[in-house]
Image (cartoon, rainbow, N blue to C red):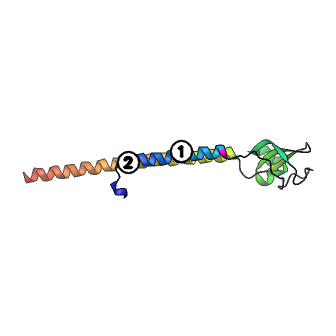
Amino acid sequence: MIEFCTKKRMLLLVTLLGGLTILVLIVESHWTDTSTSKPFIEAFENNSTCLAGENYEIIAECQPCTALEIASKSVGICVHSRYKEVLRCKSGETVTRSCDKVAWLEERTFWKFESLMFAFAVLSCLSVYWRENILRQRIIRKVARQLRSSA
């Protein structure tokens, strides 16, 4: 079935699928709610008195710890996970907890990867067209030689 598609149709289809993929990513990122409060089960720093199951509010989103915080061990969470987020418990106490991933760093890494793959795809397409032109010119020269020798 794929052999019945012209280059224009294939290019249009690939473009539409790429656009649909980007649209789905954008919609998913807007629909995903990352700021919901959930019960507190994770471990806090040793000086924390926040109770397990107590509601909390995120003051500072997950972010990487600075080199100074890691080296000086001033924030105990940074020694183990390298990422931290600051929370305010319902009791009013401010607590630091570890987190797995920083959303904006992950997103930036994703878009770097996508950009690299796009550049690779463009280079691949250009090399294919360049090779096609070389082969086409060789065929034209061969046919011209055959016509000259037969006449």
Magenta stretch: dominant secondary structure: loop
Amino acid type shown at disc 2? Arg
Residue drawn at point x = 57 percent, y = 47 percent: 24
Q: Nearer the viewer, mark 2 or mark 1?
A: 2
Q: Is residue 35 magenta?
A: yes
Residue drawn at point x = 21 percent, y = 49 percent: 140
Question: What is the span of residues highlighted in magenta in the rendered image?
Answer: 31-36
- Disc 1 residue crowd, few under 14, some 14–19, many 20+, Cα 10 Å: few
Left or right placement of residue 6 versus residue 111 in this view = left
- Disc 2 residue crowd, few under 14, some 14–19, many 20+, Cα 10 Å: few
Left or right placement of residue 99 versus residue 44 in this view = left
On the image, the x and y values in percent for residue 121 come to 46, 48
Image disc number at residue 115: 1
**Image quadrant where residue 93 sits:** top right
Dot 2 or dot 1: first in sequence order is 2
Q: Is residue 46 magenta?
A: no
Q: CA distance from mark 2 to mark 1?
A: 24 Å
Amino acid type shown at disc 1? Ser
Q: Which residue is mark 2?
A: 9
